[in-house]
Image: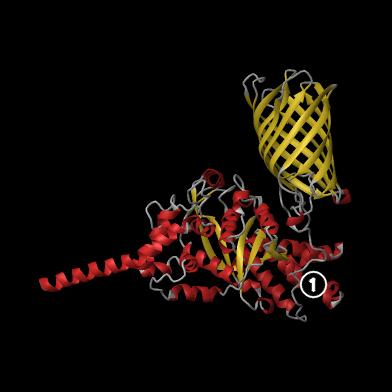
Amino acid sequence: MSVFLLKLLSLLLIFFSASVHASLLPWLQQAERDQLAQQREWLNLLHYKSLAEPESFVDDDKFFLAANGYVDPAAELQATITAFYQQPVTQCRFVARRQFLLEQLPGIDFPIQACAEYQAWRDKVNAHSVVLVFASSYLNSPSSMYGHTFLRFDPVDVESGSTLLSYALNFGANADVNDNSLLYAYKGLFGGYEGMFAAGSYIEKVKEYSRLESRDLWEYRLNLEGEEIDRLMAHIWELNLINFDYYFFDENCSFRLLELMEVARPSVELTETFPVVAIPIDTVRIAEDNQLIDSVVYRPSRQVLLAEDLSEFSEAQKAMVLRLMADPAYADTEAFLALEPARQRALIDSSYRLLRYDNDKSSRDSKVAANSFQLLKRLTRYDKASPDNTLEERPVDPLDAHDTMLVSPVVGYEEDAPYVDLVWRYTYHDLLDNSPGYPRDTSLNMAQLVLRAKKDESLQLQRFDILEINSLAPRNEFFKPMAWRVNAGWERQWTEAKDQLVPQVNGGLGASYRGPLDGRLFAMVRGRVEYNEGFDNNLDAAPGIGVGYLLQGERANTLIEAEHYEFIQNLSRSTFSVNYQWMLSKDSAIRIGFKRNLFEGEGINETSIGYRAYF
């Protein structure tokens, strides 16, 4: 190329840059005059905590066009306008920002791009309505102990089709597959993972939650409309492959979805309610409080549906189900063929589904596969029945369950000495709390504090539970879950005639069975590690045993427990307790308790009554 042509090209580039600069300068000035960078809609698009705390939740440089865009929304706005003029293709990376600028700066004349790739994705998802899905708690996964939320996008004709074909959007941690459960929990709590949005088919989420993890799904249809959905989808496109820090309790799946709903409808303020912890069901309640929810659909888990079907059989027919699972040829016996055809089909169908349920998480077994095939073949002998995914009685909507935070004033006597307790629990639900709306037979509590004032004594810390989990799902001939518990924290224990505040960790493993009045009879082998300055060696461990009975009713719950520990230092400790709770309303109750502590041949009785308020 000649020197003349190079000079000409340079002059053209200079002229073009000056021309572009002259075109965008008025818009930069107008954006500054109108204070667009301080508008809530712009801050939402950048995931800013607030103007008072100018820092974005996004932890990925790819999301920002200005070097300091993560702490300066005005700089990011100026950089966005400039990029849309000088690098028009940038508009297709930040479609929601482009929509914002076109709305807020009418007449802005940057060259509009077609963005065919975005439009093809938008047409593929075909989102005409949005559903917020809540998956019930799953105690075996630290990140899902309190439940999980994600979004589903339905096409316009969803009523005439299946929602299983819709798309779902999930936010989760990018966990290392080699991390064990303890490392996973630690990183999730203290920030060792990045989080990212991922889209996929809704049927895969149903398989994961409802089938493999036996979790009920509650589908809350949001009342978002045309422009709101367009804004939401455009912003989701901007978040593709963008990383956030991930924390189980605040910057989690539910918090991220609240941010998306604020983008869709900037007039609502949702995230400010959760400065510390974002419990999934509480985030759904916030959506309801802000009139974002139109309707709800309950999708029971496969285990719930199976249990419902099996409960309709007689004891003799339940035995037939087990016989069919072990030997499908039993369907050809005289005893089985004597049943009504409809009942025959129901028994074979339940046997097939139970066999698949029992082996979904196991490696392929040739005998199981053969039996499944034989049962499926026998089902073809009967008229095809429509699948029934409903229950005779739908459980209580989690939105109608008691609130997750608790405060409780308590008065009581320890022997003849009166005391007053103040109980504060950050979250969530124990075995005696009002159970409708929560998974039955489970408790999950974190950060429970008990302060005690005694006569002529100063205020003292009586107990602080970091974590307390109980799972008492009953065993039967079809389902055989293990009962288990874990607890960690500080509590007062009588040692050498003195109550010591001791750190401890204890746990148990056993079984629970259905008892009288549909209660739960349970027994566990337990273990305890305790640091107690009243011990000769301070640190000691104790094997133990615990038994109990839990009765949960509509208005009252009762828990009777007895436990015994034998410490290595030849110390023994036993406790017997009876607790009763009467529900005054969804969010208030009275709890009465009696406990007898036995230690080193001594016994101390404690009685109490308290008012419990949930909020």
Q: Is residue 8 left or right of residue 526?
A: left
**Residue in the foreground of this view, choosing between 608 and 268:** 268
Residue 359 visible in rendering: no
The quadrant where residue 495 appears: top right
Q: Position of residue 603 (x, y in %)?
A: 82, 23
Q: Which residue is at 70% across, 59% downward?
A: 288
Q: Residue at x 51, y 64 (%)?
A: 235
Q: Amino acid at mark 1?
A: Ala
Total marks shown come to 1
Figure quadrant of the N terminus: bottom left
Depth order, front residue of 506/434 = 434
Residue 259 drawn above or below residue 380: above
Q: Quadrant of residue 227?
A: bottom right
Q: Name the image colouring.
A: secondary structure
Q: Could you tell me which secondary element the residue under label 1 belongs to?
A: helix
Measuring from the top left, give residue 214's x and y in whole percent.
68, 59
Q: Position of residue 156 (x, y in %)?
A: 63, 77
Q: Nearer the viewer, residue 519 or 190?
A: 190
**Position in image of residue 472 (x %, y %):** 75, 47
Q: Residue furthest left?
A: 3
Q: Is residue 461 left or right of residue 151?
A: right
- In the picture, measured across the screen, residue 436 lies left or right of residue 188, that is right
Q: Is residue 570 above or below residue 48?
A: above
Q: Is residue 122 visible?
A: yes
- 441, 17: nearer the viewer: 17
Q: Dot 1: few (<14), some (14–19), or many (≥20) neighbours within 10 Å? A: some
Residue at the image position 53 percent from the left and 43 percent from the top: 190
Residue carrying label 1: 346
